């Protein structure tokens, strides 16, 4: 997936990642809740570190995120879904299926920044670099060398569209041009 | 998507700039693709050399060379495109500047018109000078009258004084001697006392 440009440095896993019960569903309600919370933080931090915008659950099952090789412990798909559902309720994840209604699907948006936050980030960057009223291509925003230091570099195009449409609604940007050759002008 | 905000419009220039920038992006993508290809050719050449197939290795290297020349060509094209884009953007800025200047000039003209032209100002300045001169004359006249009045008053006072002098007799000069000597002695005594205290100090 083009969205996941892996960062070079390895992700520093938290201590509880090496704690075996962390990988199995806790029966006590309270413990389970805190387990969900910890998983949510871990997934958010992991995705932020590797700049993953959209997570494919099936693929992720075999990655270090959900599979601790040294412990030989892994998360089951059901448990992961539970975590994702928990994150969704907290506004930190969203099922990425058709029309955003693909509940229980395979792909999940991980909102370590939600679209609104991305929108503000874009706007701030444009403001800082004095590029208001300048035409920028969408490709340029996420793929050019000018944005390599920015967190939105390499962003999933769908997410880019989402974030920009928020700015368009606020009247702070205008997206134009043909399909897959679009540009944007910020105001 | 296009009609969500009416205040910010996308002009034809914006579209032209977008086209150029898209072209630039395409060249970028093309360069990336060619870079991947050259890397692959190098890998192939190495592999063939390891197998001992020199001919194929050479072929791969030749392909790589050709692709590198393509890269150089696209570089110059990119430069052209970027130059043109910058010129267009700069021209737009210039247009804004000219517009601003025009606006400023028309405002300035408007203000000048309100002032009524050069002749009017000249006439106004002449009038002002005349008024100042007139005012000067008035004050001179008033100033002269005031001093005449003063003169009269002074003369009156002098007359009054003279009348006083001539009218009232002076007191008589005393004829008796002044008590002179005793006073001198007393003064000497005083001085000696002062000197004595001064020496003690």
Image (spheres, coloured by chain):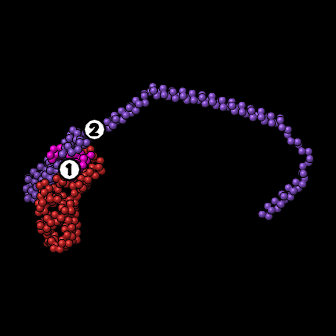
Magenta residue span:
A163-187
User: Residue visible at 22% across and 57% down?
Assistant: A114
Q: Which is nearer the eye, B143 or B74?
A: B143
Residue holding disc 2: B91
Q: Which residue is mark 1?
A: A165
Instruction: State yes or no: residue A176 in magenta.
Output: yes
Quadrant the C terminus of chain B occupies: bottom right
Q: Is disc 2 surrounded by few (<14), some (14 to 19) or many (20+) residues within 10 Å? A: few
Q: Quadrant of residue A88?
A: bottom left
Q: In front here: A18 or A100?
A: A100
Q: Nearer the viewer, residue B36 or B46?
A: B36
Residue B45 place in picture, x, y as percent = 11, 55
Quadrant of residue A153 within the rendered picture:
bottom left
Q: CA distance from mark 2 to mark 1?
A: 30 Å
Disc 1 chain ID: A
Tell which chain the image draws in red.
A
Q: Residue B184: image x %, image y %?
A: 88, 54
Q: Nearer the viewer, mark 2 or mark 1?
A: 1
**Residue plotted at (23% across, 42% down):** B6
A48 above or below A140? below
Does residue A105 lie above or below A21 as drawn? Answer: above
Rendered residue at 48%/26% (across/down) = B123
User: Does residue B136 appear in the picture of this structure?
Assistant: yes
Residue B161 inside the magenta-drawn segment: no
Please provide percent x and percent y for residue B150: 69, 33
For the colour purple, the matching chain is: B
Q: Secondary structure at mark 2?
A: helix
Chain at tag 2: B
């Amino acid at each position: 997936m083009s969205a996941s440009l892996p960062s070079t440095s390895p992700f520093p896993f938290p201590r509880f990642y090496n704690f075996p019960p962390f990988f199995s569903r806790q029966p006590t309600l309270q413990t389970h809740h805190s387990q969900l919370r910890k998983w949510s933080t871990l997934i958010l931090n992991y995705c932020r570190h590797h700049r993953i915008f959209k997570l494919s659950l099936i693929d992720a099952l075999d990655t270090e995120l959900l599979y601790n090789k040294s412990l030989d412990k892994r998360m089951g798909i059901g448990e992961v879904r539970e975590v994702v559902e928990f994150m969704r309720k907290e506004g930190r994840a969203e099922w990425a299926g058709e029309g955003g209604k693909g509940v229980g699907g395979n792909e999940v948006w991980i909102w370590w920044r939600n679209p609104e936050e991305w929108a503000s980030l874009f706007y701030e960057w444009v403001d800082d670099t004095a590029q208001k009223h300048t035409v920028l291509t969408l490709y340029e925003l996420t793929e050019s060398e000018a944005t390599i230091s920015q967190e939105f570099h390499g962003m999933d195009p769908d997410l880019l569209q989402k974030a920009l449409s928020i700015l368009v609604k606020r009247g702070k940007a205008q997206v134009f041009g043909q399909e897959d050759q679009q540009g944007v002008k910020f105001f | 998507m296009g009609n969500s905000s009416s205040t910010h419009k996308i002009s034809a220039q914006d579209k032209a700039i977008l086209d150029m920038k898209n072209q630039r992006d395409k060249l970028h993508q093309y360069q990336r693709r060619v870079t991947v290809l050259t890397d692959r050719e190098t890998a192939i050449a190495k592999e063939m050399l390891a197998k001992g197939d020199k001919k194929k290795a050479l072929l791969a290297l030749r392909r790589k060379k050709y692709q590198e020349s393509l890269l150089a060509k696209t570089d110059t094209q990119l430069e052209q495109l970027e130059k043109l884009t910058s010129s267009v953007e700069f021209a737009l800025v210039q247009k804004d500047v000219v517009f601003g200047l025009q606006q400023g000039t028309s405002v300035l003209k408007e203000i000048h018109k309100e002032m009524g032209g050069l002749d009017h100002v000249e006439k106004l300045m002449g009038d002002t000078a005349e008024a100042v001169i007139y005012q000067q004359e008035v004050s001179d006249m008033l100033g002269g009258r005031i001093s005449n009045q003063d003169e009269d008053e002074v003369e009156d006072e002098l007359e009054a004084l003279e009348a006083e002098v001539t009218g009232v007799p002076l007191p008589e000069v005393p004829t008796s001697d002044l008590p002179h000597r005793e006073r001198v002695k007393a003064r000497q005594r005083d001085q000696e006392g002062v000197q004595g205290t001064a020496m003690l100090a």
